[in-house]
Amino acid sequence: MSETKSMNQCKRPLHNEEETGSKKRRDEAVDGLDLQQSKKVPRLSPALFCNNCEIEHLQLQQLLKYAVIGKKGNATQASWCSIHHQKHLRGVVVVVLPDLAQHHFYQFYLHFHSLRRLFRHKFSLSPPNGDFIASLLGLNDLDVQVPKEKMNDQRSREAPEPTMSPDPILQKYGRERHGLTRYLLTEEEMRKNDYPFVGSSNTENYVHTQCSEEPTDSSPLFGLDCEMCLTCKGNELTRVSLVDAQGQCIMDELVKPDNRILNYRTRFSGITKKILFRVKTKLKDVQEKCKKLLPPDAVLVGHSLNFDLQALQMIHPNVIDTSLLFARDFGKKYKLKFLAQEILKREIQREDAVGHNPIEDALAALNLAQYFIEHGPEKIADIKLQNFFLSANNMKSRPDNPDPTSELEQNGLLHPLPSDGLSFLDELEKADRKIAYVSRDELRDPVPSKQFENLLCASNDEILEKACSVTPRSPFTIVKFQHGHFFSKCHTDANEKVACKFTEMMTVFAGPFKSGVCLKSVKMHFESCGPIHSLSTVSETCQPYICITYSVLEGAQLAVELLNGSCIDGCHIKVQRMITRRTLDYEDIFKEMEEDPENKNTIYVSGFTKPLTEEFLQEQLNHFKEMKSIFVPTNPKGQQCVKYCYLKFHSPDAAATAVERIRTHGGLRSMKAVTSSHLHRWLQAAVTCIPPHQECNEAVPQEDHTEIIKDLDRKMNQLYESLLENTLCVILFPGNNSSSGSLPGLGLMGIKC
């Protein structure tokens, strides 16, 4: 992935020296607060890329964990959204609206007045697997939960026969052998697994390896592993090892951190104060050495390689991550030590050694990837790693775990906890943070924690009343409103109807044209307004008309504004909207979307003649000194790069001035943005699934749920008003995952000021 390609996936700031100072000062401010106040006020700072991808439940969990227990509880910032001044947060409230999915927010957009007004930050949420609340609390992270009183009886039995579910490796890769390029992480996978890339959060000072050549199946593999220590600034590199495809170590360097070391983590790193005492090598030195050693098409291999690249502060586009390659059910990961023992029959990270050997770990990861590529997915699946894992965790005398019962008794679990050792719920309990769960029902499975309080209510009104009273004194509150099962029915049909509505809103008719009109010429003119999803001739009229459906709302709006009355192919044409029952409220929706806080200070620009590379955009737009960031969307058809983008400015005046300048000085089309990032992503997935020119069914829905939505919106407003200042509030539409299909959810979040 080159810098240009990664840029097409995310919002990214312009690194213009003249704007850096003002940008930093402005970014530190909070809406409605001056700079001096904002220094002590908690605030959210979503990563520039997060609105263009679905947030996984574990990523949401990481954000909530940091919000509740912070650094003192050993929680880390979520890569997709930072919380500044977390220690000043006075509470966290999560509101769950069951059965609602992302499309419901757009379906009832005009009725969610309070939600749109109160919450500036929104994100797509991946569909739930199983119970949503349990997933939120981390209860689904546990392999198998067993009551302690049954533990002895459970241990006396043989390991249970594992259920025959599809092997996750075969599900992902199939049975055939492939070349190494099949196993490279995609850009989406890199995002989900917190890999650094151009434009991602906190990577402004990262160094690119410059390995931008497209890899092939014969590209060289390099194993990489790093050791870190804890400094006053967080994790910093202390040792880096790189091995080539033949297993030869080509780099093994100790590195002196720039900041004061708080913990050498000798148990894992093997690094001590004495070892680093005379070391002069710094981070920038090993960065330069890596750049020199790696050829342009190099593929890096490692186990959870994202942490190594973060420690190196380097960006590399082509990676194989063995923790993801050897997949487990539900996204869990095997440890490198286990894989090396079962696959390579090699013992690493021995208990009698002081710390891990990064050369040994880098080589193990490299050999694991080579084994996988050589033998193929079917061979790996036949090894049945899951069976070895289950058996190993039920044995009483495993050599490298002499006392497994201690962990079992402590956690009440048949199998060990995830790699971080504790579930989200355990972390909260350890930090002595109580959880209040306000709902009309209990969780499906009882929660084994004294810190968890289930407050049962008889109605939504009682839920609201109790939530308003409990949130000021509870550090973490989950509120679950119930509204029957109206929205759980016909999920897919409802999603398709909303998609049809937006398709119609993005459709215009142009004409009349002469017989035999050149569609290529028409497309060229209308494409200057935005990306065209489909274009066809209307045959039912006396003279030919052209039906143009855009992929964004702005394209249709600009076509009506700028091309109506124009002369194309010698014909003076009229451009008009598609009017149906669903689009009668188009003007109201369009106006509200223009005023949406998320679209504030943002403009839409189209009509570029070249693909939008970083260099091209810098050249075209560098004269806008007030510009804050650029969002270049991905192309849903996976073809050539898009030729439109969104520009975010520091103020509404700067955005309005930019629109005027772009329109006045010719060539490009521009207007105030109406398509927010999460809507753009949903439109790509939903609208492109509708075949071009398909007639949407205009049947009026039998049930009108408007009043239910209005009531929910009022309750959200009342609850928000009752919160203490500096309370983080997150509203969740969980989405849906069923046999009929998966539909993403939506999250809205903000800190009450």
Image (cartoon, rainbow, N blue to C red):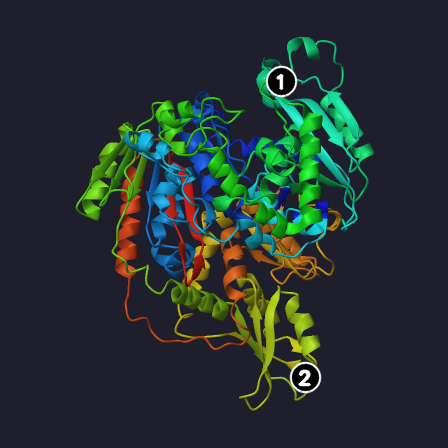
Q: Residue at x 22, y 37 (%)?
A: 455
Q: Residue at x 23, y 45 (%)?
A: 441
SS state under label 1: loop
Provide the residue designation for mark 2.
Answer: 517
Labelled pair 2, 1 in contact (Cβ < 8 Å): no
Provide the residue designation for mark 1.
Answer: 353
Residue situated in front as seen by the camera: 350 or 592: 350
Q: Position of residue 387 (x, y in %)?
A: 50, 42
Q: Position of residue 649 (x, y in %)?
A: 58, 44
Residue situated in front as seen by the camera: 204 or 516: 204
Determine if residue 621 is in view. no
Is 496 displayed left or right of 666 in the figure?
left
Of tags 2 and 1, which is closer to the observer? 1
Amino acid type shown at disc 1: Ala
Q: Position of residue 749 (x, y in %)?
A: 42, 41
Q: Residue furthest left?
A: 458
SS state under label 2: loop
Residue 292 to residue 283: above or below:
below
Is 670 displayed left or right of 283 in the figure?
left
What is the crowding at mark 1: few (fewer than 14 residues within 10 Å), some, or many (at least 20)? few
Amino acid type shown at disc 2: Val
